[in-house]
Structure formats: C-alpha cells, structure tokens
Amino acid sequence: MKQFLKYVAATVVGFFIIGIIMSILSILSLVGMASMSSTTPTVSDNTVLVLQLSGTIEERVKENPFSFLTENSATKSLGLNDILTAVKNAKSNDNVKGIYIEAGSLTGASPSTLQEIRNALVDFKKSGKFILSYGDTYTQGAYYLSSVADSIIINPEGMIDWSGMSLKTMFYKDLLDKLGVKMQIVKVGTYKSAVEPFILNEMSDANREQMTVLGTEIWSELTSAVSKSRKINVEKLNTYADSVLAFTSAKEYKKMKLVDKLAFSDEVPNIISNMMKLDKKNKYNTISVTNMAATTSNEPKDPSGNIIAVYYAVGDIVQESTSTSLSNSSQIVGKDVIKDLKELAENEDVKAVVLRVNSGGGSAYASEQIWHQVMNIKAKKPIIVSMGDYAASGGYYISCAADWIVAEPNTLTGSIGIFGMMPEVSELINEKVGVHMSSVNTNAHSDFGDITRPMTDSERNIMQSYVNRGYELFTKRCADGRKMKQDSIKAIAEGRVWTGKHAKAIGLVDQLGGLEDAIAVAKKKAKVKECSIISYPNQGTIFDNLMNDVVDTDSYADAKMKEVLGEYYNMFSNIKNVKERTGIQASLPYQMMFNL
C-alpha cells in the first residue's frame, strides 16, 4: 500500500510540475505572438545608439527567448548583420545624434568581422554625428573598433590590451598516442595543414610560414587603421605592443594619445549630454543595436517588387546536419542550401543573389553540390559572393563560380586543397581494451575502411588516387570560375591560405569590401536601381524559436562550455567534430585562435 501511495504521489507531483511548465510556456507563447504583431520600434528625438562590445560576434544571431538563463556579458552573442544594419539606420535617422561604444570583454570576433564593423563606423562619421567610447578595460579588438571614435574615455584605473597578433592552433597527437589511436592521412597540397593537429605536436615549416604571413598582414591592417584614426605612427604602435601595454597606467595611455580622457562610468552620461549640448531638463534617449536594426524590416517595401537576396552560408559545410552541443553553432547543410538556392534561382522577383560566405570548408562532396546550384543561379541571374571571416577551402569552392567576389582585406581565403583522414584504433582495442577482431573476406578489399586495422599500401594508394581526383576537380572549378588556367590556380593553391588583400593581388577575389559593397555590385549587375534587400534563410520569429528550442539542454550546456573554455571552446569543438567528417574534406588548415 505504501508503494502504491508513493507512485500516486509521484504522479500527482509530476502532473503539477508539467502544469507549471505548460503555464509558463503558454505565457511565453502569448508574449511571442505579441512580439510578432508589435510595431516597428520608434526612435525618439535626441537618441544615442548604444553599441555594447562584449561576448562574441556572429554573422547572425537567432532570437532566443531563454537567453537570460544562459547568457552573461562574456557569453552573449551579437549579430554582425544587426550591428551593420543598426549603424546604417542610425546614420540616416535624424533623431539619432551619435553612437556610444561601451567597450567590454569582446572575446569572440575575428579580424574580418571587426574590420567590417569599423568600416561601418567610419562611414557613420561622414554624417557629422559623434562617436564616443568608454571602457573599464579595452580588449585589443574593442580598442581597434573604438579607435574610430571622436573621443575615447577610459576608467582612471582602466586597462588597454595592445600586444600584437597571436595565431594559435592546438595539436592532439600525444593525446591520441596515449589513447592508442592513429590518424591515417592522405592529402594534396604542401600547405594543406588541416591534418597536422592529429599527426604532429607543432606546426610544420610550411604551416608556420603561412601563419606568419597571415599574422603579419592582418596586424598591418589593424595598426594602419588605428594609426590613421589616432594619428599615432605605426612604429610607435608596435613599440607600445612590445611593452606589455596592459600593465601601463591610464595616465600614460593619455600621454601616448591612445585615449582622450579619464573618467568613471557614472560620469559618461554628463559627457554625452554636453556633447549634444543638452541641459539637465532635456536628457538624451538610448536605443539598443537590436531595436535600431529592427527599425527596418525584412519584408519587401519597394513597389517595384525587385528583390536582392542575401543568402547566409555560415559554418562547416556538411551534407547532413550534425549540429549539437560542443559543435559549431552554425552549419552549411548541403541538402538544405541546395533547396534554398534552387528556390532563389526560380523566383522571378529575385533579380540577383548575394551569397554571404563565412566558412572554413568541410565536406568536398557537399561543396560540389552547392557549387552546382551556384552555377544554376549564375545561368539565370547575377550571383555575387561576399566573404566574411573565412571563405577557405570548401568555402572558396562554393564561392569560385560567382560572377564577382568581394572580400575584406582580413578575410582568410584560398586553401585550395583536399585531404582524407581515417582513424586506426588497433592499439586501443587490442592492447588497452583487450578486444581482438578476426574476419574473413570474399574479396581483396571487402573490409576496406575497417578502423580496427591499419590501411594496406594498396588501400592507401586507392585513397590517394581518390583525393588526387578531388584536387583536380577543385582546381578546375576554381580555374573555370576565375577564368584562369588550371596550372595558374595550382601555382597558388597547394592548400595555402591567403588574406583577402593578398587574394585580390593573385586573382582569387575581385574587390575588397564588405557586404554592402557586394550588394551594390549585385544591384549594378542586375540593372536595378530600386529594390528590397531580403536575408535568407529565414531565421523564424521568437515564437518559432520558442517552440523549436524549448528547454534546449544542448544550448544550455553549449553556453556553459563557452563560458568555461573561453577562446579554447572552438578547439575542443574541433576534436568532437572529427568523428563527423565523412568522405574527403576541403577544410581550412586549422582552427585558429586570434589574440584580439
């Protein structure tokens, strides 16, 4: 009887808990529906756009109704698309008088992303409106962005991290050796170093060479921009970087002309009011990036009905989605992208497509299928590629056929090469676990791909021939797309990664610039003056995301892993993703950490 009562009580408690959860979900659902029907945010007079530089910056951020449960200032994500749109809207809105940059722990932004935001801020200043920056601590990336401001303010006990570029990659060979796992590698390309972390304990000479060139070129872009804005020559900026600037006093920063004023955070509102020439009775208003970006909608507005489609292809290229906790938050899923691009090709209202690529590559097979759809669009209407942080290897594969390619000077691109990787775990299962395998085969290669034994010389030759064919196809696609000879492509291929600036010099891209520049090219090639700019694929409303992601334990775990691991998160994510890589790969040579 006691057992029966216990089960009844447990059932009642269970129903009670479910009832509470459903009530909360119902309330949140109503909030979501209300948000869908809400009007576009209005901008009051004397408004200042607040740009908070903390956390990470991604291409696009999906609205998450539970973000308050998992995000803090160090883990929250900002959407690059929202930032660019907000700055653009603020420039044209007469009620917005300036931008206030609130520098914080900006830890997750690559050089190209920062460069695109900074260029947008430089363009904003052409309106004659002010930009003011304040920070208790400026990370290097945050200072690079803030250097465009009319006035940079720092806390009297604040800190500026200005130490130069550091590109790191993690190597797992000793770890795999301890586990009894060996990686069997076949590749094409001297610089195709994606496999190095699994077979070496440090960079190869070729990889170190290209990493050094990349770091030097990117740092040169950063220092040149800061030098121009702050009127400090590059030599001095490098001297400051060598002096461990983070431990210098704030008063010295002012003497160095790195900042303009020392003040506490509670003094900033008065400083802004004075800049706007407001008295105490007329306080200024503030607006967030999200709300400022929302003052323009993603719905067609132009009466002509003409559409320029901006399609975001972000993350690892895979044939089937494998996105979970401890994997990249975004993926370019081949079968989904193919379907989407086909629809854009057939949509007569879409006059041109801008393919926004931010990817280090992935599946060579999926890349080939997406390339085919790019060609399908190209046969019907202009297609322009805008490169983000990365458009390398498979990311370049899906870009090379476009009518025009636009890249930021700091974009990492190229990496035209192919590799195959197969684990071999005989030592692990035989010696460490104590399990032994025995088999009979009807043919010479019936058990080809068996990871419990090493590949034979014959099998390795078969794999190498397969990879070689993939490389020939890859270089031919690039040669045809860039209207170059295949031998010329091979001369700059070999898996080598180039900055966007260098890639333009050798013919891999056509123009240096950002997404807005690519859109301008698309409009010109489509011969449309008036049009609506619409982003794809649709990210869904907050209500859709609520229904899809309710109590998403993976998302919660993912956020906590990011919080704990910080800049090393992507490295551990890369280890996890190894088992999901099937077939030959066209991937960036390494997972890099930028000290920015």
Image (cartoon, rainbow, N blue to C red):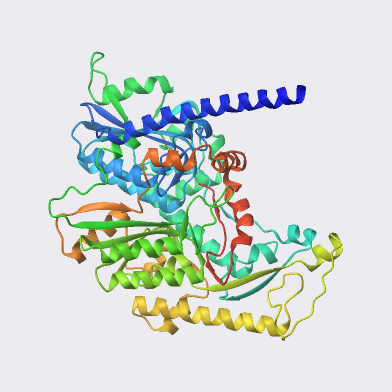
Q: Position of residue 14 (x, y in %)?
A: 61, 28
Q: Position of residue 502 (x, y in %)?
A: 41, 66
Q: Judge whether residue 152 can be spotted in this image.
A: no
Residue located 57% across and 40% down the image = 553
Depth order, front residue of 19/113: 19
Q: Is residue 492 above or below residue 308?
A: below
Residue located 79% across and 80% down the image = 440
Depth order, front residue of 340/132: 340
Quadrant of the rendered image containing residue 167: bottom right
* Quadrant of the drawing holding the N terminus: top right
In the picture provided, is 131 more to the left or to the right than 447? left
Q: Judge whether residue 462 can be spotted in this image.
A: yes
Which residue extends farthest top?
281
Q: Position of residue 391 (x, y in %)?
A: 43, 62
Residue located 75% across and 82% down the image = 441
Which residue extends farthest left?
303
Q: Position of residue 276 (x, y in %)?
A: 24, 25
Residue located 59% across and 47% down the image = 569
Which residue extends farthest front?
1
Count of numbered tags: 0
In the picture provided, is 129 more to the left or to the right than 195? left
In the picture provided, is 207 more to the left or to the right than 536? right
Q: Is residue 261 above or below residue 362?
A: above
Quadrant of the rendered image containing residue 122: top left
Quadrant of the rendered image containing residue 433: bottom right
